[in-house]
Image: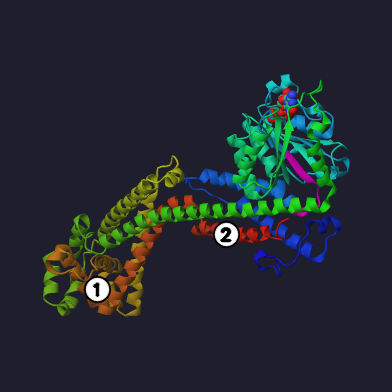
Amino acid sequence: MPFTGAPNWHDEAVNPSDSTQSGGNGAAALVQEAAIELLESVRTELAGLDLPLALPGVDEARAAASAAQAQLDDYILPRWKSLDAPLLAVVGGSTGAGKSTLVNALVGHPVTRSGAIRPTTRQPILLHHPDDASWFTSARVLPTLHRVHGELAKEQTPASRAGASPDASAMTSLVLVADSAVPAGVALLDAPDVDSISDDNRQLAGQLLAAADLWLFVTTANRYADAVPWKLLLDAASRDITVAVILDRMPQGAEAEVAEDLRAMLQREGLAGAHLFVVAETAVDGLGMLPGQAVAPIHDWLRDIGDDAAGRADIVRRTLNGTVRSLSGRLEVLATAATAQQDAGRQLAQDVESAFADAAARISKASSDGTLLRGEVLARWQDFVGTGEFFRAIESGIGRLRDRIGAFFKGQPPPAVKVETAIETGLQAVIVDQASRASEDADQRWRADPAGRQLLGTDDLSAPSAGFAAESAAEIRAWQGEVMELIRAEGAAKRSQARLLSFGVNGLGVVLMVVVFSFTGGLTGAEVGIAGGTAVVGQKLLEAVFGEDAVRRLAKEAKRSLEARCESLLGHEKRRFLERIGDEQDAFEAPAARLRILAAELASLGEMGGHA
Ligand SMILES: Nc1nc2c(ncn2[C@@H]2O[C@H](COP(=O)(O)OP(=O)(O)OP(=O)(O)O)[C@@H](O)[C@H]2O)c(=O)[nH]1
Ligand SMILES: [Mg+2]
């Protein structure tokens, strides 16, 4: 069901808490079904998105595509599928800001590790009310994270942490802790530091924040203006996610000033709606625990959220819609990247096409402007037509030629085969030469372009493929056979068997080839030179046998066939380049268009139901 076409889109009040888990009601269930269908299509599109060309910014685009996919899997899809699931509040922020200590204080006993060695929290720990267990034990959210249940026995000792597994990211697990001190309806996730020195940690923190319904952003007086957390906060603002900022470990006396500065920053950056909690610096006890009252306002706020199903649904909806809208924007960006790929792919294909089209044109010209009627071909042709007698026969008029030509060839079979062989060699040289030029040209153009260079890799396509010369020779011989066949067929049709027999099919075939090679119509006299002159003789001979119209038609047909065969020969060489861009040129076109459509549909979905 396309979103853009959904009836009464904004009029139908959609209350997430009405659907699925409680069985759903008509309109909301339909909307939900359509939303999931759309999101699955987006997921499929992103999974299939290929950005093969090395264009500027393509690495970022590829990363954005996989991040968007991950967010669909980690958060958007599971959230749309179960709108009633408990709210996931991710506690994130700078290293050592006191996140774990805060989480422990919120539940009232030491659950998650806090420590002096940074970064302390490597394994994310998810604390939930026992009644909410089913929501988190399954791979519903964050499906790529392996689940570890129970206590923190699995967490490493500081010693083993120092020698952390080299494959830490593959082993990333989510530690699930059921604790009745956590309000039902709200789960707390103690995340690794967002500005970690460890890439894996940082990436994991980003992934967890992307899966959050609600952020508890923990910072300190020293760290609150740091760049990394702010980048994340701005991303949060762009997604409209509900954020609570916790200014932790505030020294006595500095509170008002720092809080005011932070509030102004939040306001400037579009986060005016963020809740700000200030936690005063307090001594921790022997277990590293803060006194409960230090975090009482945060505790109460979370408990209220847990108690208020409608308020929770508002938070869920607001974050979900914001995230979907931001995904829509990212799809637009990806569509632009796909368009750039499409344009670049077209340009690269165009480079190859034009190099080979030029080659085809040059072959066509060389095989019709008399160029071929030189050297060996000319010598053998002259042997073939004989010397003076042939010309005298022509000069004395075509009528007499008819009478005499039979006698001319009689008794000494014309060396037509030698002419054929010379033609094969001459034509092959022209074709191989032009194919080489085209390959070199195409290779050079691609090499001048970073994307083309990447497509070529270490391959050198600047010369035709190994078998090209032999293939060309075979193709020319096939053409010559076809020309002979044309002559034979024409002879049968014209009932000119007798005359045909007197010259021989091979002889007339060779004459037709020579006529083709001089078939310009425009060249005369000195321009055509000796070769053209003898070609005219050949043409007259053919006309004497078949008639003028037939000769024109036969020459045209032979020429057309030669060009088609050259086209196919060059086509193979061209394909060596084009297949690197992708089998179908159109493959470049479709994704950009589809991404734009999906982006528009996501934008509608993200506007759904307004905001809390
Ligand atoms: N006195 C005092 N110490 C605190 C407070 N909060 C945290 N600490 C100490 O600061 C250190 C770091 O605290 P953690 O809670 O581990 O910080 P974290 O943000 O979880 O750190 P990472 O997991 O490494 O990102 C620990 O030694 C804590 O005992 C506080 O409010 N008062
Ligand atoms: Mg920690």
Q: Quadrant of ligand 1?
A: top right
**Image quadrant where residue 217 sits:** top right
The amino acid type found where label 1 is placed reads Leu
Q: Is residue 532 visible?
A: yes
- Residue shown at the point (73%, 21%) measured from the top left: 158
Secondary element under disc 1, as helix, strand or loop, is: helix
The amino acid type found where label 2 is placed reads Arg
**Image quadrant where residue 132 sits:** top right
Q: Return the mark for residue 596.
A: 2
Quadrant location, the C terminus: bottom right
- Residue shown at the point (13%, 73%) measured from the top left: 393
> Relative to the observer, which residue lies in front, 465 or 359?
359
Coloring scheme of the render?
rainbow
Please state the horizontal and vertical placement of residue 280, each as a whole percent of the image: 73, 30
Q: Is residue 121 visible?
A: no
Secondary element under disc 2, as helix, strand or loop, is: helix
> Relative to the observer, which residue lies in front, 533 or 109?
109
Mark 1, mark 2: which one is toward the viewer? 2
**Image quadrant where residue 26 sits:** bottom right
Please state the horizontal and vertical placement of residue 579, each as a whole percent of the image: 48, 52
Q: Are marks 1 and 2 in contact (CB under 8 Å)?
A: no
Residue indicated by mark 1: 542
Q: Residues within 10 Å of mark 1 (few under 14, many from 20)?
A: many
Horizontal side of 166 relative to 569 (left or right) equals right
Please state the horizontal and vertical placement of residue 423, each as a whole percent of the image: 27, 58
Between discs 1 and 2, the one toward the N terminus: 1
Horizontal side of 586 relative to 532 (left or right) equals right
Examine the structure image and report whether residue 84 is included in the region drawn in magenta.
yes
Please state the horizontal and vertical placement of residue 331, each as a whole percent of the image: 59, 54
**Vertical relation: 258 (above or below) 422:** above
Residue range corresponding to the magenta coloring: 79-90
